[in-house]
Amino acid sequence: MVGIVAIMIVTHFVEIAIWGGFFLLSGMIPDAALAMYFSIGSYTTLGASGISLPGHWRGLGGFEAMAGMLMFGWSTAMLAAVVLKVHNLDT
């Protein structure tokens, strides 16, 4: 179970890093640390980073939040499926 959760956390981090890299490479956020900070805030739907994207890109943070919610929902469903499968093996 710990291994599965670790894989999921790494998967979430990779997606956050991809979004952060996109924000950095596109020039929307000029600093790597700030790009990652904004990405973590958006992905987790916290949205309290205090950083905003320029002009017409502002809505992109919302799309990252939607992707994050979907990924967290998928992770929850996968954990529930694993627990159910493990529980069925025990009985």
Image: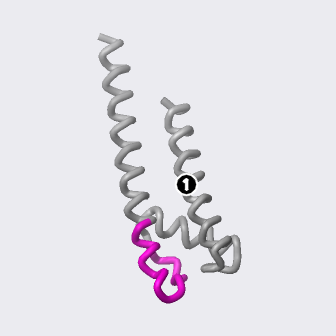
Image coords of residue 28 (percent x, y)? 60, 80
Q: Residue 47 falls in which quadrant of the image?
A: bottom left
Image coords of residue 7 (percent x, y)? 55, 38
Q: Is residue 31 magenta?
A: no
Q: Secondary structure at mark 1?
A: helix
Residue name at image x 30 percent, y 16 percent: 88
* Residue farthest to the bottom, as pictured: 55
Image coords of residue 33 (percent x, y)? 68, 71
Residue name at image x 58 percent, y 53 percent: 13
In the rendered view, would you say 54 is above or below 63?
A: below
Counting every numbered tag in the picture gives 1
Q: Which residue is mark 1?
A: 15
Residue name at image x 41 percent, y 67 percent: 63
Q: Bounds of the magenta span?
A: 47-63
Front-most of 81 and 17?
17
In the image, is 30 to the left or to the right of 86? Answer: right
Instruction: Give the image's coloring scheme.
Output: one colour
Image coords of residue 52 (percent x, y)? 51, 83
Front-most of 90 and 76?
76
